[in-house]
């Protein structure tokens, strides 16, 4: 069965989408069959991979016959249709035969309220019993259709019911961050929110009405794979002083606040799994500087920052040599990161 990895932080602008795309591509290049899932109603991942620029382009995708996005996949459960949930017809990611996109939908947020009510485990739950397990079921049948090894789920920057469900029914999760005050504060918030989500999920797993539903709520316990710190400037090959101070604060918050509550709530892997993968949870599992101009080119050509051609870079001479050196470093960092993720999730 495919392993699900959620990329989650309720702080926006921490490169969740960029990490999902580049990490997914690298894992696919190592022979793993990967589906990247756009669970964010903003649909940035869908736009990045398809080259869509706005709602008009997305509307053309939505109007195709069949099930081509996450919202349409969930519609049988959320709109009480007499048909079962079926796999989403994913899109092949151009240039990467082992990678597929499960497209997002700007209307996914319309299901938030109904899902939230169903997840309150109230007396009215009988009429909504299929909803909490429907997301997991959709991902399962879609993964089975494509023989996927991994699903990487790009989540929105929110604490809503959809994110609660996606993370709670994942096998693993990564927390992307940027070295700034807001990520330090987000660490404190996550230390409060994640145990509550875990407690809710444990309770849901014990509810007979959810276990006897058409789409049973799965018995899963997501495990922390670490943080991904990105988007900082370098000086002499290292983070500049201001960024280094924020990185140190993030590491301190993870070590002193986040890890203890994750450990207490069965959200960590055994210590030897981290050690074998070369992961020190007090440090970022992956850390890399700002991509600068490479990110715009990556989006333009729908390719990862480490796999752009000389022609796509549009540079010559010393400038091209410097850019290729940076690309080589990003390739190395993503390769090492993918190896760590694979090692921890086998």
Image (cartoon, rainbow, N blue to C red):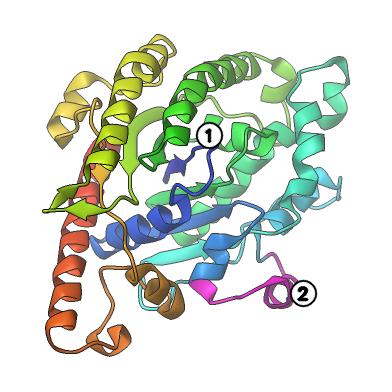
Q: Is 90 rendered above or below residue 263? A: below
Q: Which mark is residue 341?
A: none
Where is residue 178 shown, x and y percent of the image? 38, 43
Question: In the rendered image, is residue 328 in sight?
Answer: yes
Q: Is 301 rendered above or below residue 41? A: below
| Point 71% across, 58% down: residue | 106
Q: Give residue 270's quadrant in the image.
A: top left
The residue closer to the viewer here, 15 or 343, is 15
Q: Which mark is residue 63?
A: 2
**Residue at numbered disc 1:** 167
Where is residue 136 shown, x and y percent of the image? 59, 40
The range drawn in magenta is: 49-67
Q: Quadrant of the C terminus?
A: top left
Where is residue 152 shown, x and y percent of the image? 44, 50
**Identity of the residue furthest to the top in this view:** 264
| Point 32% across, 34% down: residue | 246
Q: Is 72 rendered above or below residue 273? A: below
Q: Is residue 53 magenta?
A: yes
Query: From the viewer's perspective, is 101 left or right of 314?
Result: right
Query: From the viewer's perspective, is 72 left or right of 272?
Result: right
Q: Residues within 10 Å of mark 1 (few under 14, many from 20)?
A: many
| Point 49% across, 70% down: residue | 49
Q: Which numbered disc flags the more N-terminal residue, 1 or 2?
A: 2
Which SS class for mark 2? loop
The residue closer to the viewer here, 106 or 233, is 233
Q: Is residue 341 magenta?
A: no
Where is residue 233 shown, x and y percent of the image? 27, 53
CA distance for labels 1 and 2: 29 Å
Query: From the viewer's perspective, is 251 left or right of 91?
Result: left
């Amino acid at each position: 069965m495919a392993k699900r990895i959620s990329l989650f932080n309720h702080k926006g602008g921490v490169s969740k989408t960029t990490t999902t795309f580049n990490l997914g591509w690298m894992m696919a290049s190592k022979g793993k069959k990967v589906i990247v899932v756009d669970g964010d109603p903003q649909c940035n991942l869908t736009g990045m991979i398809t080259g869509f620029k706005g709602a008009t382009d997305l509307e053309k995708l939505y109007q195709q016959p069949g099930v081509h996005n996450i919202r349409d996949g969930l519609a049988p459960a959320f709109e009480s249709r007499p048909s079962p949930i079926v796999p989403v017809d994913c899109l092949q990611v151009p240039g990467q035969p082992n990678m597929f996109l499960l497209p997002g939908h700007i209307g996914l947020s319309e299901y938030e309220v109904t899902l939230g009510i169903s997840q309150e485990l109230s007396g009215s739950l009988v009429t909504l019993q299929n909803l909490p397990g429907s997301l997991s079921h959709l991902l399962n049948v879609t993964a089975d259709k494509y023989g996927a090894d991994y699903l990487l789920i790009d989540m929105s920057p929110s604490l809503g019911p959809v994110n609660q469900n996606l993370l709670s029914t994942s096998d693993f999760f990564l927390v992307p961050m940027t070295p700034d005050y807001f990520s330090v504060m987000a660490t404190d918030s996550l230390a409060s929110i994640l145990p509550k989500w875990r407690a809710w999920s444990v309770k849901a797993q014990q509810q007979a009405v959810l276990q006897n539903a058409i789409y049973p709520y799965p018995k899963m316990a997501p495990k922390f794979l670490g943080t991904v710190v990105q988007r900082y400037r370098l000086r002499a090959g290292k983070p500049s002083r201001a960024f280094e101070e924020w990185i140190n604060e993030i590491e301190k918050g993870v070590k002193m606040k986040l890890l203890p509550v994750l450990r207490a709530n069965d959200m960590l892997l055994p210590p030897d799994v981290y050690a074998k993968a070369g992961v020190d949870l007090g440090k970022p599992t992956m850390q890399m500087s700002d991509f600068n101009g490479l990110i715009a080119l990556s989006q333009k050509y729908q390719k990862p920052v480490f796999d752009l051609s000389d022609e796509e870079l549009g540079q010559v001479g010393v400038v091209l040599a410097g850019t290729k050196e940076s690309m080589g470093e990003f390739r190395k960092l993503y390769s090492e990161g993918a190896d760590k993720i694979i090692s921890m999730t086998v």
